[in-house]
Amino acid sequence: MERFIIPEDASDVDEIEPLNSDAINKFDCMLGEAIEFVEETNAIKGISKRVYYDIVDDVAYLSGEVFLNPTITDYNSDSVTLNISISDVLNDVQNMKIYASGYRIANIELNAEDVGKALSIEIPEKCIEKGDVHLRLVFKNAVTPRQIGILDDDRIMSIAINRMWYE
């Protein structure tokens, strides 16, 4: 099944582009290097707003589905751990499924108790090819801020993170 990227104002578009999830948010990083969600840093790293909807106080609010395609430049042919620092969980519970190169590697339930903690998810060696990792994060319980009564906003959001890194 092919998926497409639909722009916000699709009425003015004659053609839509196919979704090439392996090309979205492609960036280089090193083991241990923190990826912080500060506007200037992300522009340099090549992380686009397709990861998040907004940055507020150096925190990135994620949508209901996120693609990340890092190349870990100092990869040494072993498993890698993805660490994500949680700043907020929108909704009472967020069920996060993480896929790496098509394999589901984690199914995590997040709630308010996870705020301020870092998640650690092992990415098996079989999911990494020459340092390239194709990650897909899916949030089953993503909501709009309007639905939970915090803002008059209809964008679908899931969690907020302030940094991530690989070990």
Image (tube, rainbow, N blue to C red):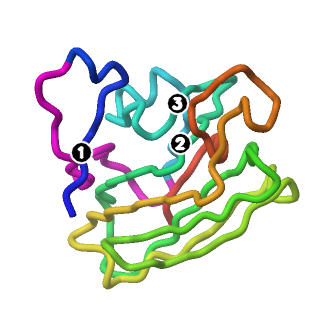
**For the residue carrying disc 2, how many other residues have a C-alpha within 10 Å: few (<14), some (14-19), or many (20+)?**
many
Q: Are marks 2 and 3 in contact (CB under 8 Å)?
A: yes
Of label 1 and label 2, which has the lower sequence position? 1
Of label 1 and label 3, which has the lower sequence position? 1
Q: Amino acid at mark 2?
A: Ser
At mark 3, the secondary structure is strand
Judging by the rendered image, the residue that carries numbered circle 1 is: 4
Q: Amino acid at mark 3?
A: Tyr
Q: Is residue 152 magenta?
A: no
Residue segment shown in magenta: 13-32
As rendered, which of 124 and 104 lies closer to the eye? 104
At mark 1, the secondary structure is strand
Numbered tag placed on residue 63 in the rendering: 2
Q: Position of residue 47 (x, y in %)?
A: 38, 36
At mark 2, the secondary structure is loop
Q: Position of residue 9 (x, y in %)?
A: 33, 19
Which residue appears farthest toward the left when viewing the image?
15
Numbered tag placed on residue 53 in the rendering: 3
Tell me the quarter of the picture where residue 131 sits: bottom left
**For the residue carrying disc 3, how many other residues have a C-alpha within 10 Å: few (<14), some (14-19), or many (20+)?**
some
